[in-house]
Image (cartoon, grey):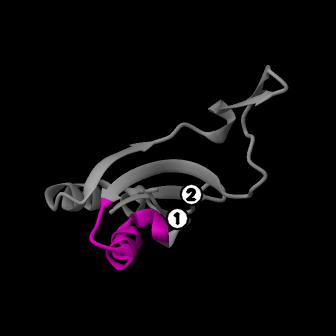
Amino acid sequence: MKYLLLICTDGPVDADEAELDPTAWVEENDSRGVRLLGERLRPAADATAVRVRGGDVLVTDGPFAEAREQLGGFDIIECADLDEAVGVAAGHPMARFGVVEVWPFWTP
């Protein structure tokens, strides 16, 4: 089953660059065939929200979410079940400094 990992923080992280470097996590999960795709995202201030209301396109510059946490990146993984996905998420360096949300893909 595929899962989306949302890598979130609630602001600047007070940690060494080495502690935040996800390279080892990426290489391990790529080599196991678990990680399918992932990218770091630009800051929320660079995001754009698009809504259509009453036929009008409404565009809002970021930040747009009413949340303290900000999305910093994402990964798409494929695991046997949620337990494996949680284990993969727990190994991501940002799980120690922010939060990694695990979202299963909708499958019919």
Q: Badge 1: few (under 14), some or many (20 or more) residues near its Cα, within 10 Å?
A: some
Picture quadrant of residue 40: top left
Quadrant assignment for the N terminus: bottom left
Query: Which element is circle 2 on?
Result: strand
Residue 77 higher or lower than 99, as above or below: above
Q: At label 2, which amino acid type do we have?
A: Cys
Residues at circles 2 and 1 in contact by the CB criterion of under 8 Å:
yes
> In the rendering, which numbered label is found on residue 8?
2
Residue drawn at (74%, 29%) of the image: 61
Task: Find out whether residue 84 is within the magenta segment.
Answer: yes
Left or right? Give the position of 22 relative to 28.
right
Task: Find out whether residue 4 is within the magenta segment.
Answer: no
Residue drawn at (37%, 52%) of the image: 76
Quadrant assignment for the C terminus: bottom left
Residue drawn at (40%, 65%) of the image: 93
Q: Residues in magenta?
A: 78-95
Q: Nearer the viewer, residue 83 or 9?
A: 83
Q: Give the residue at the far left of this rendering.
A: 31
Q: Measure the C-alpha gap from mark 2 to mark 1.
A: 8 Å
Q: Nearer the viewer, residue 49 or 15?
A: 49
Magenta-drawn stretch, dominant element (helix, strand or loop): helix
Q: Earlier in the sequence, mark 2 or mark 1?
A: 2
Picture quadrant of residue 55: top right
Point out residue 66 in the picture as x, y percentages from the top left corner. 79, 52
Point out residue 38 in the picture as x, y percentages from the top left corner. 36, 46
* Residue bearing the label numbered 1: 101
Point out residue 42 in the picture as x, y percentages from the top left corner. 54, 37
Which one is closest to the eye, mark 2 or mark 1? 1
Left or right? Give the position of 42 relative to 107.
right
